Amino acid sequence: MDDHHSEDAESGRLSSTPEALFDRYGHHLDDPDEPPLSEAQKMQILVPLWIFMAGCVEHGLSLKSGDNFGANFDCGIDDVLSSLEAKLALRDADVSPITNNKEQNT
């Protein structure tokens, strides 16, 4: 990991800040097909993500890609991000899983 979001080995705490997350990943929130987000809008997305990440690390959960959160878990951060991505895709497509299931049953 780099200096922006490394884990302090002694404390188990995330040494990143929301600002470091913004500096590193803020540009990934720009969609060339949409009007650009303001810095404030990007921070509204990244701060809750940072809080989630910091909480995971403080409770000893792994955020390393490909790992499960811990020995007692059968999922990891990749699973959470994939689920969020799928939900955002459904929202963007304006398709509800409930509506979709009703249509399939008729």
Image (cartoon, rainbow, N blue to C red):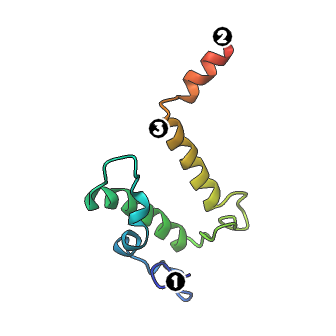
Mark 3 or 1: in front is 3
Please name whichever residue, 82 or 53, is drawn nearer the observer in this view of the structure: 82
Q: Position of residue 21 (x, y in %)?
A: 41, 71
Mark 2 or 3: in front is 3
Q: Quadrant of the C terminus?
A: top right
Instruction: Please tell me in which quadrant of the rendered image residue 80 appears.
Output: bottom right
Please name whichever residue, 82 or 50, is drawn nearer the observer in this view of the structure: 82
Q: Position of residue 67 (x, y in %)?
A: 69, 67
Instruction: Please tell me in which quadrant of the rendered image residue 17 appears.
Output: bottom left
Q: Is residue 4 above or below residue 103?
A: below
Could you give the CA–CA distance between mark 1 and mark 2, rounded to whole angstroms?
52 Å
Circle 3 Cα neighbour tier, 10 Å, few/some/many (<14 / 14–19 / ≥20): few
Circle 2 Cα neighbour tier, 10 Å, few/some/many (<14 / 14–19 / ≥20): few
Please name whichever residue, 33 or 10, is drawn nearer the observer in this view of the structure: 33
Q: Secondary structure at mark 2?
A: loop
Could you give the CA–CA distance between mark 3 and mark 1, rounded to whole angstroms?
33 Å
Which residue is found at the position 54% from the left and 81% from the top? Answer: 12
**Looking at the picture, which amino acid does disc 2 mark?**
Thr
Circle 1 Cα neighbour tier, 10 Å, few/some/many (<14 / 14–19 / ≥20): few
Q: Seen in the image, is 87 located left or right of residue 21?
A: right
**Count of number-bearing discs:** 3
Mark 1 lies on residue: 2
Q: Is residue 4 above or below residue 67?
A: below
Mark 2 lies on residue: 106
Mark positioned earlier in the residue sequence (1 or 2): 1
Q: Secondary structure at mark 1?
A: loop
| Residue 92: numbered disc | 3
As drawn, the residue found furthest toward the bottom would be: 10
**Looking at the picture, which amino acid does disc 1 mark?**
Asp
**Looking at the picture, which amino acid does disc 3 mark?**
Asp
As drawn, the residue found furthest toward the front would be: 32
